[in-house]
Image (cartoon, rainbow, N blue to C red):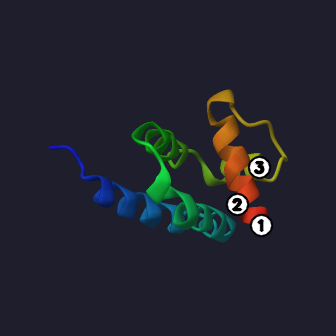
Amino acid sequence: MTEQRDTRIKRLKMRSMRRGIKEMDLILSAYADANLAGMTTGELDLYDALLEENDQDLYQWVTGQAATPARFGSLIGEIAQTFQN
């Protein structure tokens, strides 16, 4: 059975705010609240894949301490921009 869009968004929001480190909880939950509802299915797929990544890696990518993998480049840029605003 396919997950309904609203259920998927709720799941992604929960995963965004229940991370391994508090900094990523704050960063990803702010991004999720501001953006998930307006994302396409493909964008949600990419965000879902991003949530599978290690928090320490995500934090370094968002803060510019490490190079972001190409597939996540624009998404990490958006997340960093949302958090800085």
Identity, as a three-letter code, of the amino acid under mark 3: Gln
**Relative depth, front residue between 51 and 43:** 43
Q: Tell me how far mark 3 sits from mark 1, CA to CA.
A: 18 Å
Give neighbour class at mark 3: few <14, some 14-19, many 20+ (Cα, 10 Å): few
Assign a secondary structure to mark 1. loop
Q: Position of residue 1 (x, y in %)?
A: 14, 44
Give above or below for 22 relative to 16: below
Query: Which residue is identified by label 3?
Result: 60
Residue visible at 37% across and 64% down? 10
**Relative depth, front residue between 44 and 16:** 44
Query: Which residue is identified by label 1?
Result: 85
Q: Position of residue 78 (x, y in %)?
A: 69, 50
Give neighbour class at mark 1: few <14, some 14-19, many 20+ (Cα, 10 Å): few
**Relative depth, front residue between 60 and 38:** 38
Residue 21 image label: none
Identity, as a three-letter code, of the amino acid under mark 2: Thr
Residue 14 lies in what quarter of the image? bottom left
Q: Tell me how far mark 3 sits from mark 2, CA to CA.
A: 16 Å
Query: Which residue is identified by label 2?
Result: 82
Circles 3 and 2 in contact, beta carbons < 8 Å: no
Circles 2 and 1 in contact, beta carbons < 8 Å: yes
Residue visible at 24% across and 53% down? 4
Q: Nearer the viewer, mark 3 or mark 2?
A: 2
Q: Position of residue 68 (x, y in %)?
A: 73, 37
User: Is 60 on the left or on the right of 2, as rendered?
Assistant: right
